Amino acid sequence: MTKAEYLAELEKRLGVLDAEERAELLADYEAHFEHGRASGRPDEEIVRRLGPPQAVAREILYQLSVDRASAQPTLRRVSRAVFAGVGLGLVNVLVLLVPFCAGLILVAAMFLVSVLLVASPVLAFVQDGPTAVFLLELPLLTGMVGAGLVIWVAAVRCSSLFVRWMVAWLQRNVRMIAGDRV
């Protein structure tokens, strides 16, 4: 594969980026070729050292998505970064997807429990109707509403902590991948 073919394939794979960002990245990889040629290496050896353009593009897109999630840590950006990382290989499915799904399930379960506890008086009223049993259960139901509100606040806090932890985990994974390349 020649320099022109490599850069054309890399540009095609980075098509989701804006033109300025893509041009900057392509200039960096063109510099790799120029440096390699100055050292007397043929294009084929430079391509072999850089790796396939498809893999390079996936790594670049993964790193950019992690950078964006770090800059503005939201669940949506973290999700995009996780799935970009999962596209890098089977190991990342275990390293990224498993903790991401486990954390998401835990936070979602906390929100679900809190909603059910807050809704418990309504559910009890629907089940029992306006009876003496409902009135006897009212103090307990009020406590359940309070517990539900506390769990809701904890779920909000946990979701924030989860997003920050996941961003740190993604950044660590990017450093490990970059370390493998060096």
Image: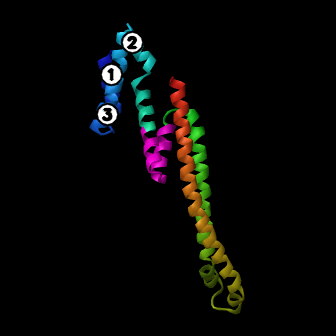
Q: Residues within 10 Å of mark 3 (few under 14, many from 20)?
A: some
Q: Position of residue 145 (x, y in %)?
A: 63, 77
Type of amino acid under label 3: Arg
Per the image, the residue denoted by label 1 is 30
The label nearer to you, 2 versus 3, is 3
Per the image, the residue denoted by label 2 is 44
* Left or right position of 106 against 47: right
Q: Is residue 77 on the magenta stretch?
A: yes
Asked which secondary structure carries label 2, the reply is helix
Q: Would you say residue 113 is visible in this rendering? A: yes
The answer for how far apart the CA atoms under marks 1 and 2 are is 14 Å
User: From this viewpoint, which residue is outermost toward the top?
Assistant: 40
Per the image, the residue denoted by label 3 is 22
The label nearer to you, 1 versus 2, is 1
The answer for how far apart the CA atoms under marks 2 and 3 are is 23 Å
Q: Position of residue 80 (x, y in %)?
A: 45, 45
Q: Would you say residue 1 is visible in this rendering? A: no
Main SS, magenta residues: helix
Q: Position of residue 37 (x, y in %)?
A: 35, 11
The answer for how far apart the CA atoms under marks 3 and 1 are is 12 Å
State which tag comes first along the sequence, 3 or 1: 3
User: From this viewpoint, which residue is outermost toward the left?
Assistant: 19
Q: Residue at x 61, y 61 (%)?
A: 109
Q: What is the magenta range?
A: 64-86
Asked which secondary structure carries label 3, the reply is helix
* Left or right position of 92 against 17: right
Type of amino acid under label 1: Glu
Asked which secondary structure carries label 1, the reply is helix
State which tag comes first along the sequence, 2 or 3: 3
The tally of labels here is: 3
Image quarter for residue 139? bottom right
Q: Residues within 10 Å of mark 2 (few under 14, many from 20)?
A: few
